[in-house]
Amino acid sequence: MIKDTFGRIHDYLRISLTDNCNLRCFYCMPEEKYAFAPAGKLMQVQEIETIAKLFVDHGVKKIRLTGGEPLVRKDAPKILKSLGKLNVELAITTNGIRVNEMLTELLEANIKTVNVSLDTLQREKFLKITRRDLFDRVRKNIDLLLENNVRVKINVVIMKGLNDDEILSFIELTKNHNLEVRFIEFMPFTGNLWTSNQVYTLHEILLKVSSRYDIIPVEPLPNDTSSKYRIDGHSGAFAVISTMSQPFCDTCNRMRLTADGKLKNCLFSKDETDLLGALRNGEDILPLITQTMMSKAKALGGQFSGVFEDIDVSKLENRSMITIGG
């Protein structure tokens, strides 16, 4: 069992498989021409399995694969197969572009939940955000997952002036589709040009939705990072991840492993521990894991308070989102 000094049990590990991606979303990847990590610096299939198994042996119950875009790795099928053998709930976050190519592997790995990142339902705006003309493929692959009884969650980063006018359109998706739309408040990372006036908060989202629908709150599960709601007569549901306006750090159970094998005890932590280097040197990495999690700050990596309007982004120390893992 992996704990921190605040008594929080950490049983959820997010593993980034790569910092590479086949999209170029401006809020995630700082530049079009991006220097991705060399393959040799990334965790290899056996190394991922070894580290993941150690975490599972010490209480981890859920593993989520992230990127970049995890499915761009050529050995993604091998990784899915190896982790699918572990006694753990396995999930993945993807931009959805390669789902049709990898559907068999995803199903064989017993992945029950797929989070698809999609910030707009408009083809032209998708091109503006991602700098790639692949909107139709993503929409078709969401339908493909639903047809194969995979639980789908759509991750929508909401930004004022960009896509806040589409909130009700996303809600409409839940009427006839048994999926969950997750609105995510815009968060600051290195290179993503974050400003506080772009944040569209939980309160504002609920006001927008309630202008058309009666909202029914759903009782949260332990360690939930989102506030979940449903609408009477809708097959699906929606949720809001309110990291900026109403942080949920008190019940956090998450750990993050970057594609180059660094352990972060918080999305916003400036410190990280090199598990991969230690593993390649033949060291026991369990003490490193324990020490890293015991040093976890009470909230938000210890870098800022819960008042997002007061954040000075020039003083934040962190990676870009794509090198942390979504």
Image: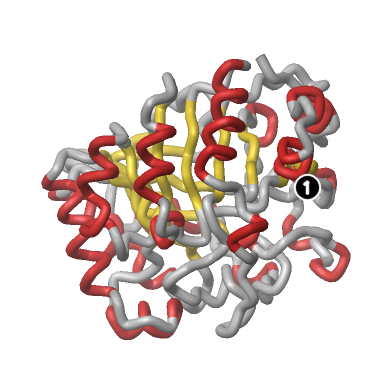
User: Is 280 situated above or below 11?
Assistant: below
Task: Please state which of residues 246 and 268 is positioned toward the viewer in this rendering.
Answer: 268
Residues 135 and 45: in front is 45
Q: Of helix, strand and loop, which one carries label 1? A: loop
Instruction: Indicate the quadrant where residue 23 lies.
Output: bottom left
Give me the residue at 73% from left, 61% from top: 319
Which amino acid lies under the numbered mark 1 shown in the image of this protein?
Ser
User: Does the rendering let one see residue 231?
Assistant: no
In the picture, residue 156 is in which quadrant?
A: bottom left
Quadrant in the rendering for residue 79: top left
Residue 269 image offset from top left, x and y in percent: 78, 47
Q: Is residue 103 left or right of residue 184?
A: left
Quarter occupied by the N terminus: top right
Q: How many marks?
A: 1
The figure's colour scheme reads: secondary structure
In this orientation, which residue lies closer to the viewer: 84 or 30?
84
Q: Is the C terminus in the top left, top right, bottom left or bottom right quadrant?
A: bottom right
The residue at which mark 1 appears reads as: 269
Q: Is residue 13 positioned above or below 241 on the image?
A: above
Using residue 44 as the reference point, say whether residue 206 is left or right of it.
left
Q: Position of residue 96 (x, y in %)?
A: 32, 60
Q: Residue at 53% x, 66% y: name it.
A: 20
Q: Residue furthest right?
A: 315
The residue depicted at 69 percent of the width and 29 percent of the height is 250
- 223 lies left or right of 215: right
Residue 33: x, y in percent? 59, 84
Which residue occupies 46% across, 27% down?
A: 220
- Seen in the picture, residue 54 relative to 129 is either above or below; the reply is above
Position of residue 158 measured from the top left corner of the image (x, y, whole percent):
48, 64
